[in-house]
Amino acid sequence: MINRIRDIRKEKGMTLADVAAACVPATTAQTIGRLETGMRNLSLVWMNRIADALNVEPEMLVRGEASAQPQIVARLTDTGAEALPKPRDAILPTQLAGSMPLICLAIEASAGEYRAGDQLWLRQLPPEEAQQAINRDILVPRKGGRFAFGRLIDRRETLVGVLPPGIGQRQIVIDNPPWLAVAEMLVRKL
């Protein structure tokens, strides 16, 4: 089993000391560090304390090695959607469930209705189901490890037409993408 305390803590912008102080009773940053690195055994008592401190369900802190983990695969910048050098694990909002894989787009620069700091959760679809995503925001892989992000405005045979968010953007046409991912949930920090 793999411990996800560090991933969740960093996703929430908390330090080891923040988590330690939020535990009831409070503990030390060193203890939290040992628990998240596996130097100390993560008991059920510790799992419940840390989950409460991080405001998540206890089962989110651990996962089986074989389980598929939602990942942040791209980010939206001033120049458009970019692939991350290495996908990283994401914390799945509890409202999302289903059989198709989920991925996350981290918004780093405001574009259209999206603000810097947002997370856009998308559900992967096979290309033959693209019709159900017409007029919805999608993420589409392109050649060379790149991505296109925007509104799906056209689908003809193997071609997919995407209009990026923002004023004055030009349509991007992708030929025969292996998959596309349709936006399902926007997570915005207050």
Image (spheres, helix red, strand yellow):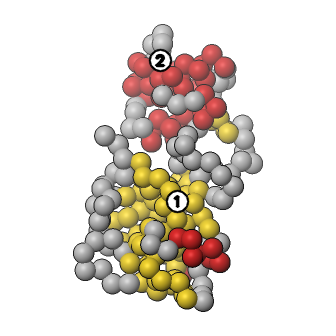
The spot of residue 26 in percent (x, y) is 45, 13
Determine whether, in the image, residue 81 is placed left or right of residue 45: left
Numbered mark located on residue 23 in the image: 2
Q: Residue at x 30, y 61 (%)?
A: 113
As drawn, the residue found furthest toward the top would be 25
Amino acid at dot 2 = Cys
Image quadrant in which you'd find residue 40: top right
Q: Which residue is mark 1?
A: 122
Is 92 located above or below residue 85 in the figure?
above
Which quarter of the rendered picture does the N terminus lie within?
Answer: top right
The answer to whether one can see residue 37 in this image is no
Image quadrant in which you'd find residue 49: top right
Q: Residue at x 62, y 68 (%)?
A: 125
Q: Residue at x 38, y 38 (%)?
A: 13
Q: Residue at x 53, y 48 (%)?
A: 90
Determine whether, in the image, residue 154 is placed left or right of residue 40: left
Labelled pair 1, 2 in contact (Cβ < 8 Å)? no
Q: Of callouts 1 and 2, which one flags the residue occurring earlier in the amino acid sequence?
A: 2
